[in-house]
Amino acid sequence: MIHLDPQAYLDLVRRAVAEDVGPGDVTSSAIVPAGATATAEILAKSACVVAGLPVAAAVFSEVDRSVTCHPRVADGTRILAGAVLADVAGPAAAVLTAERTALNFLQHLSGIATLTRRCVDAAGGRATILDTRKTIPGLRALAKYAVRCGGGTNHRAGLYDAILIKDNHIRLAGGVAEAVRRARTDRASLPIEVEAQSLADVREALDAGADVIMLDNLSEAEMRQAVAITGGRAKIEVSGGVTPDRLPAIVALGVDYISIGALTHSAPAADISLEIHVDAGPAAS
Amino acid sequence: MIHLDPQAYLDLVRRAVAEDVGPGDVTSSAIVPAGATATAEILAKSACVVAGLPVAAAVFSEVDRSVTCHPRVADGTRILAGAVLADVAGPAAAVLTAERTALNFLQHLSGIATLTRRCVDAAGGRATILDTRKTIPGLRALAKYAVRCGGGTNHRAGLYDAILIKDNHIRLAGGVAEAVRRARTDRASLPIEVEAQSLADVREALDAGADVIMLDNLSEAEMRQAVAITGGRAKIEVSGGVTPDRLPAIVALGVDYISIGALTHSAPAADISLEIHVDAGPAAS
Amino acid sequence: MIHLDPQAYLDLVRRAVAEDVGPGDVTSSAIVPAGATATAEILAKSACVVAGLPVAAAVFSEVDRSVTCHPRVADGTRILAGAVLADVAGPAAAVLTAERTALNFLQHLSGIATLTRRCVDAAGGRATILDTRKTIPGLRALAKYAVRCGGGTNHRAGLYDAILIKDNHIRLAGGVAEAVRRARTDRASLPIEVEAQSLADVREALDAGADVIMLDNLSEAEMRQAVAITGGRAKIEVSGGVTPDRLPAIVALGVDYISIGALTHSAPAADISLEIHVDAGPAAS
Amino acid sequence: MIHLDPQAYLDLVRRAVAEDVGPGDVTSSAIVPAGATATAEILAKSACVVAGLPVAAAVFSEVDRSVTCHPRVADGTRILAGAVLADVAGPAAAVLTAERTALNFLQHLSGIATLTRRCVDAAGGRATILDTRKTIPGLRALAKYAVRCGGGTNHRAGLYDAILIKDNHIRLAGGVAEAVRRARTDRASLPIEVEAQSLADVREALDAGADVIMLDNLSEAEMRQAVAITGGRAKIEVSGGVTPDRLPAIVALGVDYISIGALTHSAPAADISLEIHVDAGPAAS
Amino acid sequence: MIHLDPQAYLDLVRRAVAEDVGPGDVTSSAIVPAGATATAEILAKSACVVAGLPVAAAVFSEVDRSVTCHPRVADGTRILAGAVLADVAGPAAAVLTAERTALNFLQHLSGIATLTRRCVDAAGGRATILDTRKTIPGLRALAKYAVRCGGGTNHRAGLYDAILIKDNHIRLAGGVAEAVRRARTDRASLPIEVEAQSLADVREALDAGADVIMLDNLSEAEMRQAVAITGGRAKIEVSGGVTPDRLPAIVALGVDYISIGALTHSAPAADISLEIHVDAGPAAS
Amino acid sequence: MIHLDPQAYLDLVRRAVAEDVGPGDVTSSAIVPAGATATAEILAKSACVVAGLPVAAAVFSEVDRSVTCHPRVADGTRILAGAVLADVAGPAAAVLTAERTALNFLQHLSGIATLTRRCVDAAGGRATILDTRKTIPGLRALAKYAVRCGGGTNHRAGLYDAILIKDNHIRLAGGVAEAVRRARTDRASLPIEVEAQSLADVREALDAGADVIMLDNLSEAEMRQAVAITGGRAKIEVSGGVTPDRLPAIVALGVDYISIGALTHSAPAADISLEIHVDAGPAAS
C-alpha cells in the first residue's frame, strides 16, 4: 500500500471544508429533513488511476463523524469508466454538504496519478519518472502522494531534503567545483545534484563529484553525449518540457531519471462523481 | 483593478513557504555568501493572461521582508511571450529560496486566467462565463480571483452564499415547488437557482419561481427549447462538459450563463519563469 | 446588500466561542435536560442601526450546527427599541451557551454602525464620513463592515492598500516632493495621500501632486483656506478629534472627507438582548 | 504587579499585526531609507489609567525583534495628560509600521482601566466592582486584565469556571431548588450564583443555598430588602444598567458586588499617541 | 484550588486528539453500535499525587461534547493504589476513542506531581523546591501546573519573565557588575538572579546586588560557605543534579531554593487506567 | 538514515520557541551586544543514543535563520559521554535564546532512543520491540521517530491506521468472532489484532482469524502456552509492564512482539548540554 500520513492532510481537509461550507450549507439546511439519510457511490466517469480515497473519506468525516466512506479499491488502482470507487452512507444533509469538497480532492489527485501513470508506462521501466517542486501551493504532500499512486517516484520534498545546485548557485560560488565543495562540507550526508546547461557543465559537474547531473533543456543529441561522458559515474536526470510523446525517445538514450513538472501543475482533473440515493427516513413520513 | 483581499491569501502564503522551505534551504545556505544580492525578472515564456502578482510579491516578502517585487503590469493583462511581468530585488539567498513558491502561485493562477479569457472571448460577450465550486482545495478565493482576472464572473463562493437546489434536494422535499418554497421561507434574501435535467424540470422550476434554472447536461436542442419556455422569466445557466469549442454554438442559443468547472480544476499552468542576476556583493570581493 | 465575506470572520467566531466556553458550559451541562429545545428572539432594547447578524448566526452554528438563526432585517437597517432582529431555534443548551458571544458581536458592531449613522446624518451628504485604522485588534474587517452598515465609507484597510505619507515619512525623505516621488515610483497604481499640519504643508502637498491632502488638527479657518488653496486639484480630508456636534460646521467648509477614529475605537455597545423560551421537550416530561 | 500571562496575547498580537500590515507597509517601504532609525515616546494626551504596555511592547517586537519598548510606568498607574508612558527605539520603518497596532491595544485597554478606576473610586471601597462576560470577542483575557489594572475584580472568565443559574436554567430544572441541586451534584467544587428577578426569587435562592445572588434590574428599594432578607447568608451582586453616577447610592445599600458590562463593552478609548523622532542615519548622509 | 487556566491547554488538547484519532478510530467505528453507552472509572493503579483531571475532562469533551467526566478528588491530592479519581459517562465509542489521550495527559502530569511531592517532602519545608525550564516542548504551562500540584514552586515561566544571568552573559558584558547593571537599567521591575560557578562568583554577584544567586554544581562545602558569605543579603538557589536522596543534606545547609530539572524532564508516568463498562443500549437489543 | 518528515515537527518547534521566549528573552536583550557572535558544541554528558538533531537544528533556525547547527553524528548513533553531537554558530543572543528549547527536544528524544536501544539489545534480536500510543500529547510523531532511532519498531501511529480489538469492543460486539467479522467487513485492508486476557481468549482470537494476538498481562507460563496454541497461525504480542530485566525471559518464550509503554512515557531525559563560546565581535571592541 502506498504510504500517506493522515496527519499530513487533516488540517487541509479542515480548511477546505471551512472554505466551502463557511457558516453553513444554506440549501441543505433549508430543504433536507433532519432525519433523512443517504447512501452514495463514488463513480469514475472515465478511466483513470485513483488517488485520494482516504482524503475524501476524511472530508466526509470532518463534516459529520457519522458518515462512513468505504473504498472498494486501493489508491493507485487503474479504474475503468463506470467503476465504483467507494460507498458512502450517513445523514443526507452531511453527504450533500461534503460531496463537492471530497470530489475536489479526488479529482485533482486522481488527475495527477493518471497523468503520472501514462508517463511511467511510456517510459516502459527504462527510466524513473520523477515529479518536481512545481506543485499547487499547500498541496505538496498530497500531490507527491498522487505521483506515487501513478507509479512515479518523488524527487526532493522541498528545499530542505536534498542539494540541487543551479546556475545561480554556481555563479555565486565562483564555479561548479567550489559550489559542490561547499555543499559537501555543509551537508555531508545529502546527495548532491548539479544542473547542467551544456556538455561543458556536465564535465565540470562530473569532475566536481556530483551524484546526479540534471540536463536542463538539452537537445536529445546532447543528452546522448552526456550519458556517454558520465559513463555511469553519476546519474543523469533530464528536465524541462518533457511530454509523454517524447518519453520513448528520451528513455532510449539511457538516462536515469526524467522529471516532469506537468505531473503536478497541469494534470487535468479526473472525471469522478458522486451518485447519491436519499431517503427521507421514518421521521419524515 | 480587480479586487483581491490580501487577508485571503496571507495564511496560505505562509503555509506554502513552510511546506517548501521546511527547516531551511540547504543548497542556498551552504553556497550563497551572506552579503550577496540579486535582481530578477519574472518573465512570461508563452502568451498568457497574468494573475497572482500580488501573491507572488507576498511570497518574496514572507521569505524576507527586504525583498521587493514590483509588478510592471496589472493582474488581468494579456501578455505576450517574453514580456517581463515584475522586477524582483533583494538578498540573493532569499530570492532563490522564494522563487519556486512564487512561481507556483503565479503559474497556477495565470493558467486559470488564461483559460477563462479564452472562454470569455469565445462567448463573445453574448453569455456570461461562470466558474464553479470545483476548485483545488484551499485555493478557492485565489482561483475565483483568477477567473475574474480572465474576464469571467464568479458563481457562488461556497455553500453559504446562494441557494442551488439539485435533484436530491428536490427528491427530499417531495418536488421542486416544495423545495423552492422551503428555501424561500428559510432564506428570503438569497436568489434561488434550480437544477433541471429535462424540459419538464425546466417548466416545474419556472412555475416554482426559480430565479435561475441550471440546465444540467441537456442537448443543444433542449437548451434552445428551455430558452423558449422560460421566455426571460428566469435566467438560464448551462452546465456540464462545456469546452471552448462548443461555446459559440451554445451562446447562439440565447442562454444567460455558462458555467465551466475546467476553468479551475483543469487549466494547465502558464509558463512563467524567474530570470535571476546574482551579485556576490562587496563583502565577497 | 452590504458585502461581508464569511471567510473573514469564521476563524474569529471559532476563537470567540472557545474563549467563552472553554472546556464546557458548566451551568447548562449540569442543569439543561438533553432533549430540551428553545426558541429565542434577538431584540433591540433601544434604537440602533443593526450590524453583525450573519456573524451572530455563525456563532450559534459554531456551538451547534443544528441551531438556526434567521434575521428579520438586513444589516444596516435602523431599528426602533423593541424590534425583533432575528429568530433563533435549536437545542436549549446550545442556545444558552452561544447567547453571550453572539450578543457580544452584535452589540459591538451595531454600536459602531449606530455611531457612524449619526455622523453620516450629521454630515448631510455633503462630505463623506470615513473610518480609520483605529480599530480593536483582530476585528478590523468586521469593524469596517459595521461602518459600511452605518452608511460610512472605508478608508484604507491597512498599511498595504494605500499610500499615506505622514510627517515622519516627509522628514526621512527630505521633503514632501521627494516623499511623493518615491511613493509614485514604488507604487504607481496606488493613490497618494499626504498629511498636512499647516497651510504651507497643504501647498507643498499640492505641488507634489498628492491625490488627497489630510488636514491634521487644523482650525476651521485653516480648513476653509485649505479648500480655497487646493481649488479642487486634490481632495481634502479632515482628521483628528471630530465629534458629531462639530460635523455640520466642518461640512459647510466644503471638505471632501472627514475621518473619525471614534467610530471604531469608542462607539458604545448597542443595547441588544436575547429573549429565550425554553421547552424541556417530550423527553423530559 | 498585576499578572498577565504573555502566552494569553502573543497569538492575538501576531494576528493584529498581520491584519494591519498584510503583505507590507507600502508607504514606509517606499520612503524610509534602509538605515534610518527612530526613537519615540508613548504619550498620554489626557489623564487615564494605563493598561497594555507589555502588549504594546510585544507588537513592536513582533514587527521587528530589534525594536525596544521600555515602560516608564507600570500598568495600573494613573497618568496625567502629557506623561510619557514608554520609550521606543529601533529601525524607523519598523517603528512606523508597528505604531498604530501598538496604540490600538493601548488605547482600548487603557480606556477600560480608566472607566473601571472611575467606578471603583465611586464605590469607595464599600462594594467590589466586577466585570462581566460582555467583552469584545477575542480580547477576553486582555479586557479582564485591564479591569484589574483599573482596580476592578474579575467575575468568571467564561462559561467554564463558575456556575451562574439564570431564569431559563431555573425554568428547565423546574425551580431554583432543583437547579441548585443539579449544579451542586455535578460540580461540587464550584461556588453557585443564582439570578433573581424579584424578592421571591431572592428567598428561593437563599433557601436553595446559593453562594451569591445576582439582583437583575431590581429597584433600589428591592435591593435594600434583598440585603435585609439574605442577612449575610449569601453575597449580593447587583447587575444591569449601573452607571458611575448611580454607584454611591447603590453602594450605600450594603450590597457586596456590582457588575458593570460597560467596563468592557463601552469604555471610550484613552487618548494615547506616539511621538516619533526619526534619524536617517549615517547611511543616508 | 491550584490555578490552571483552561485557555492554556484547550489548543493542545485539540491537537493531541487529532494526532491520535486522525481521520477516525477505525476499530470503534467498525465495532461499536451507534446507541451503545459506557460508564467508566479513572483508577490509580499505584499511589501517586494526581494532576491533570480537568485536562482529561477536556479530552473527553473534545471527542464528544456529551461525555461527562466528573472528578472525585481535586488535583494535588495524594491517592492510594485503587482509588477512583473520576467518573466518566457517555457514548461508548467516544469514551473508547478518548481513553488513551486522556490517560496520556493524566499519567504524565501525575508523574510530575508525584516526583515533586517526593522532593518537597524530602525538603521538609526548610527549602523551596523549584522547577526549571527543562520541560517537554509544548507542555510548559501544564508541567508547571503539575509541579504546583505536587507542592513545588514555579521558577520563571520562560525567558520573558525573569532575569537569569549565566556565565556567557557575564563574559559578554565584561563582568558580573556590568551584566547586572545592564539588566537593572533595561528591566528595572524584574528581580535579578546570577549564576555562580565558584565562591568568587558568589562574592561578585553579591557585590553587584543580585537578588538571587544560583550555585551551579558547587560542592556541599562550597554551598555552606556561600550561605555564610551572603548572610541573607541575597537568596541562594542550588541547581544541578540534585536527587531526592541528596535533598536532606542540602536543605540542612540553609539554602533557600533547590531547582530540579528532573521534575519535568524525567518523572516516570504515574500508573493510571480507565475501567470501562459498556452497555450496548436499547437500540442494540 | 531513519526517516523523519520535517513537516511533522515544524509547527511544534514554532510553538515550543514561542512558549519559552514569549515576547522576548529579557536577559539576552539587556546584556548581549548587538554584534556579538557565538560558536557552541552540543555535548553528551553521559552515554546515550542520540535522537532529535534535526529538530534541535530547526529550533535554532526558528529563533534566527542565520544560526547554523551541523550534526557530527546521525540520529540513532550510540554516543559516549563527552562526545560532540553538533556544532552551532551564529549571533550570540540567538544561540543563548534557542539553547534550552533545542536541548529540551534533544534530551527527551535521546532519552527515548536510549531506553529503546537498551530494550532492543536485551531482546537480542529474537523478538521485535514495539512502542505504544502512550506518548506525551503533541509529540507522537517525534516520540515514534526516537523509538526507531533506538532500534525499536513502531506499533500503530494512532487509532486510524490499525485495528486493535480490546475487551470492551468484544463485549459490545457480543464476542470475538463477531468483532473480528465487523472489523474485517469494515476495513478489509487493515491487519487485525485482538487483545487476549486468557488462553481461552487466545483460542477464540485464533479461530476468529486474528492476524496478531496481544497477550495482556498474562503470566510467562501462559505466554508459553499461547505460543504453542497459535503455532505460528498468528503473531503473538506481549504487552503490559515489561521491563528490560524481564525481556530475556520473555523473549525466550518465542513471542513475536513485545510492546513497552515506558519507552515513550517514562524514559528519563538524556544528559546533553550546550557548551557556548561567545565573542563580543569587532563592534564591541
Image (cartoon, coloured by chain):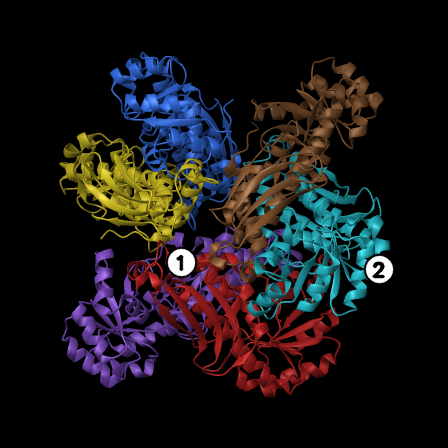
Chain colours: A blue, B yellow, C purple, D red, E cyan, F brown
Identify which amino acid the numbered label 2 is placed on.
Answer: Leu
Choose between A185 and F52: the one closer to the eye: A185
Picture coordinates of residue F197 (x, y %)? 78, 27
Residue B281: x and y, percent? 33, 46
Q: Is residue F21 visible?
A: yes
> In the image shown, does D8 or F37 lie closer to the viewer?
F37
Residue C253 vertical placement versus F111 (above, below)? below
Residue shown at 37% from the left, 74% from the top: C115
Q: Is residue B280 left or right of residue E106?
A: left
Q: Callout 2: few (<14), some (14-19), or many (20+) C-alpha neighbours within 10 Å?
A: some
- Could you say which disc has been placed on residue F123 in the image? none
Left or right of C174: which side holds A210?
right
From this view, report whether residue C185 is shown above or below residue C256.
above
Viewer-nearest residue: C278 or E31: E31
For mark 1, give the secondary structure. Answer: helix
Q: CA distance from mark 1 to mark 2?
A: 56 Å
Chain for mark 2? E
Residue located beneath label 1 in the image: D19
* Residue C107, quarter of picture: bottom left
Quadrant of the image for the C terminus of chain B? top left
- Determine crowd level at label 1: few under 14, some 14-19, many 20+ residues with C-alpha closer than 10 A: many
Name the disc covering residue E253, or none: 2
Q: Name the chain letter of the residue that bears numbered label 1.
A: D
As drawn, which residue projects farthest toward the front? F285
